[in-house]
Amino acid sequence: MQELDFSNLLKKYDLKATPQRVIFLRELQKAGHLSIEELESRVKSVIPTISTATIYKNINSMVQKGLLHEVKLPGIKTKYEITKNRHAHFFCESCQKVLDIEINTSCIYQEIDKEFSINEVNISIQGICKECMKDNKKVS
């Protein structure tokens, strides 16, 4: 995966390209989806003195500007991802990974938009990922 130009990406969303924000985005790109706590753990290895409040403040700013997207799944803490094309999320109940699933949501918009004004569609699927299914077969 090619690393994004985080400084230009921040400027595109009318945000100052601070070293902390660049590190946040780099970690989010590497992991795909991170909670604040997971992000804090990764960032503290690079910037040990960073406060939790600074992380929350910056993540909230990036969410408000549309650069980051909140991923809310039942039973787990909110995770964050860099905004990208519409997609669904698969949550593995075994390893706790959140994976992106590319799906065409246009039919949902076309059908529901007749009766409602839609701002966003969130589709989440829960189950066991292929990796965990393979591991479970090895144990059996």
Image: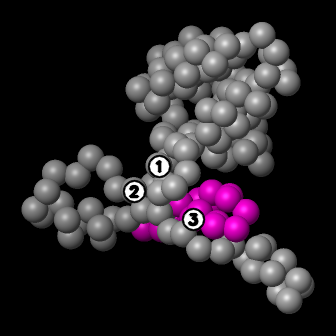
- Whether residue 26 is visible to the viewer of this picture, yes or no, is no
* Contact flag, marks 2 and 1 (Cβ < 8 Å): yes
Residue 139 appears at what percent x and percent y? 88, 83
- Of mark 1 and mark 3, the one earlier in the sequence is 1
User: For mark 2, does the 10 Å Cα neighbourhood hold few (<14), some (14 to 19), or many (20 or more) residues?
Assistant: few
Residue lying farthest left?
Answer: 115
Q: Is residue 96 left or right of residue 131?
A: left
The type of colouring in the image is one colour
- Of mark 2 and mark 3, the one earlier in the sequence is 3
Question: What residue did someone put label 1 on?
Answer: 72
Q: CA distance from mark 1 to mark 3?
A: 11 Å
Q: Residue at (73%, 77%) from the top-left corner?
A: 130
Q: Amino acid at mark 3?
A: Phe
Question: What residue did someone put label 2 on?
Answer: 122
Q: Residue at (64%, 66%) from the top-left corner?
A: 92
User: For mark 1, does the 10 Å Cα neighbourhood hold few (<14), some (14 to 19), or many (20 or more) residues?
Assistant: some
Q: Tell which tag, 2 or 1, sits nearer the viewer.
A: 1
On the image, which quarter does residue 21 sit in?
top right
On the image, which quarter does residue 135 sit in?
bottom right
Residue segment shown in magenta: 89-104
